[in-house]
Amino acid sequence: MRAVGVVLFLVVLGTVVATGARRWRIPAPSLLVLAGVAVASIPGVPALHIAPQTIALVVLPPLLYASAEELSLRDLKTVWRPVTVLVFGLVLASAAMVGALAVALTPLHASMAFVLGAILASTDPVAVTALGRRLALPSRMQTLVQAESLFNDASSLVLFRVAVTVAVTSGAFSPLGAGGEFVRLAGGGLLVGAALGGVVIVIRRRTADPVLETVIALVTPYAAYVVAEQSHTSGVTAVVVAGVVLGRSGQRLSDARIRLQLHAVYGVVVFLLETVVFAVIGLELPALVRDLSPGTGWWPLQAITIAAALLALRVLWMLPVSSSLTPADARHSWPVAAVLTWAGTRGVMPLAAALSIPLVTDSGQALPGRPLVLVLTTAVVVLTLIAQGLTLAPLVSRSGIALEPEHTAREEAEARARLARTALAHLDAQSGSEITDELVLDRVRRALDARLQQADEAAHAPGGAGEAGTHLAAYTALRREVLAIQSTELRRLYDEHEISDTTRREIQHDLDQQEIALTDDAR
């Protein structure tokens, strides 16, 4: 009952804080962490201890899956080189730097210092997606930070497992063994995720029941994670790959009603899990601090130093990356590098990794330094979520690289106008046909003309009742045909890089709603 009460409390706390965050235009993850720290600091509040398996198995899979589904595969192809550099080079450099700093600044042994470095080496996909959801970043920049956070897990997980093995067994580090471990984890996770994604595609093509589709969508990330972990590969990598594969194919696997239902259900699931997990991060810090042994009172300064060093190193790596993103205008390199650096926050993944550190060594003795590693990890996570989270939006707006609202609105309006013109051209080709009634054609044409006029006005602006009898069936059939043609045109505009992924999703959502309205009117 206590566990149920804690979960209900976290949901209520998260809902209240998230509501306030939207009203005050503050990133919800940052405010949730602050609220968690404040609540845990109240005298008499019991300490909160979450099992690492709870976060790794219950919370992470659906959040990672949702983030991977949002990743634009088209834009990913344009940034895979800098993403590869960050996934390998920056992770290794960050782990080495944090390990060296921990040896110099803390009482941690070298092996545990490297464990800390491996934990904090990678950015967190859950935090990056949650913080970047409301930012108007250009599509390539958004894809870069999101893809980096999703795919750097394999390299950091290999480093973490090697470091923990050395710390627990006092064994020696083997570069060849680490390379084999990476191939097994990353390669195996990729194969499991791709295979499971293929199986789910086959199943969903043969399923038209909205309830079954929703269950399959909710079970898929958990299945990918469990199968990969049981195969001794990377469960996180498997979830990410499955999400990317199914996100690319989702449009062709289900109809409008199912897509809208999945969108609503996953929106609720992601909201609840994000609010709970970010509140947990804040609630855990005071309890972990109370468990520290004497002689570790300098941990706040140590955590601030490590967080600052990670930012400085990230700036150095992002400068050449930003130059590759803005080759035509080198003046934008510094603003782009600053935004890319500030967007790379730590979050749920490092906390789950730190909590999974064994309690004892192979000899049965308590693992020295584990409490300090937990405190430093959580403190760095809290610092990045608060400091970077609260200042990321102002930094983006002042950098001059954010997309203006007028730009996004104009792109969407122009795309809608293109779709309306494509549909009208199809109707003109149907005119005079014996198959389609002229009255039906005229009604559909008038509806499209109205939408085209609205779209044209929006694109160039500065800064009904059902039909009875056979006409209703004919009208509904023709409108469905027109919507299908518009969906095809929308995919073409996206595939040919004429619109962004955000615009594609917005317009497809509107087309799905129109199709559902037709179904409701026909009943």
Image: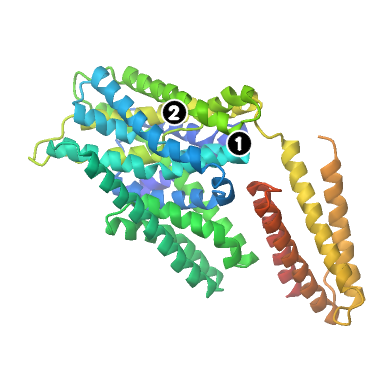
- SS for dot 1: loop
Q: Do the residues labelled 2 and 1 touch (CB within 8 Å)?
A: no
Residue 250: quarter of image:
bottom right
Residue type at mark 2? Thr
Q: In this view, does 100 lie above or below 494?
A: above
Dot 2 alpha-carbon crowd within 10 angstroms: few under 14, some 14 to 19, many 20 or more: many
Q: Mark 2 points at which residue?
A: 384
Residue 295: quarter of image:
top left
Residue 517, given in percent of the width and then of the height, sits at: 73, 65
Q: In this view, does 456 lie above or below 350?
A: below
The structure residue drawn at horizontal position 72% and vertical position 41%, both measured from the top left corner, is: 408
User: Which of pointers 2 and 1 lies earlier in the amino acid sequence?
Assistant: 1
Q: In this view, does 157 lie above or below 227?
A: above
* Pick the front one: 234 or 51: 234
Q: Is residue 442 above or below residue 86?
A: below
Residue 67, given in percent of the width and then of the height, sits at: 50, 48
Mark sitting on residue 135: 1
Residue 371, given in percent of the width and then of the height, sits at: 23, 31
* Pick the front one: 59 or 108: 108
Task: Report if residue 222 is visible in the image.
Answer: no
Q: Is residue 84 left or right of residue 356?
A: right
Residue type at mark 1? Leu
The structure residue drawn at horizontal position 29% and vertical position 21%, both measured from the top left corner, is: 101
Residue 97, given in percent of the width and then of the height, sits at: 33, 25
Task: Report if residue 429 is visible in the image.
Answer: yes
Quadrant location, the C terminus: bottom right
Q: Is residue 512 left or right of residue 170?
A: right
Q: Measure how far apart labels 2 and 1 are at the Cα level.
A: 17 Å
